[in-house]
Amino acid sequence: GHAFASHVQDWSPGDPDWNGGAGRAIVGALNYIATTGGNSLYFLPMNVGGDADDVFPTLSPGDRTHYDISKLSQWETLFEHADRLGVLLHFVLAEAGSVETYHDNGTLGNQRRLYYRELIARFGHHLGIEWNLGEENNYGATKHLQFASYIQGLDPYDHPTTTHTKFDDLSQYYAPLLRSPPD
């Protein structure tokens, strides 16, 4: 799991924590990133079925519609600290495999819409955010454009939206996403 125990020493008095110190290790890890010159945090807010298979914003790993407000409050505390440290939050919204198809079998259905809406509504106000549609994903240009359009329609702060695929096929995956600037 993601315990970050070695970074408890990087937590400082006055830094946030929760549940009697439970957040000190992850806050310390964020402090460590900032003190080494790092200015971005690349993370998956949901990876059920993925490489680590241990992060989800809902009440349980299989629950796709009931969000854990206590957990999301802890995330907000950490993200506020990231703002203070000048660390950009790079939300990777999916990864290859079952994470990619976790919501609505990989389509823009009600579960994915709710997932995007919850993250944007709760965290979109932060200073530095990038929404990444998916790590090493196979969505294809049509879904990329559909997902990005939905996110951009929700995000009142116009944070950048990006993606990356596991294939380097420019013509199939990237060329359709490159558009001329608006007139």
Image (tube, grey):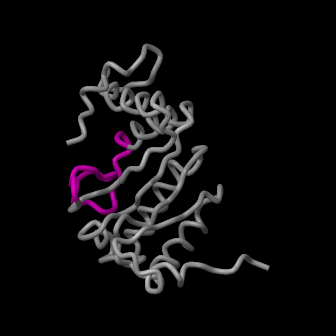
Measured as percent of width and height from the top left, residue 103 is found at 33, 70
Q: In the rendered view, would you say 92 is above or below 149? A: above
Residue placed most toward the observer, 97 or 176: 176
Q: Residue at x 29, y 73 (%)?
A: 101
Q: Residue at x 61, y 68 (%)?
A: 153
Is residue 20 among the parts visible in the rendering? no
Magenta segment, prevailing SS (helix, strand or loop)? loop
Q: In which quarter of the image is residue 8?
A: top left
Residue placed most toward the observer, 10 or 74: 10
Q: What number of labels is visible? A: 0
Q: Quadrant of the C terminus?
A: bottom right
Residue placed most toward the observer, 57 or 173: 173
Does residue 8 appear left or right of residue 80 in this picture? left
**Residue 116 is one of the magenta-drawn residues:** no
Measured as percent of width and height from the top left, residue 127 is found at 61, 44
Q: Residue at x 20, y 62 (%)?
A: 49
Q: Quadrant of the N terminus?
A: top left
Q: Which residue is drawn at 41% across and 40% down?
A: 75
Residue placed most toward the observer, 86 or 159: 86
Measured as percent of width and height from the top left, residue 58 is found at 31, 53
Measured as percent of width and height from the top left, residue 142 is found at 47, 84
Does residue 171 appear left or right of residue 23 in this picture? right
Is residue 104 among the parts visible in the rendering? yes
Query: Which residue ends up furthest to the top in the rendered image?
Result: 13
Magenta-drawn segment: 51-71
Does residue 183 appear left or right of residue 144 in this picture? right
Q: Quadrant of residue 27?
A: top left
**Residue 57 is one of the magenta-drawn residues:** yes
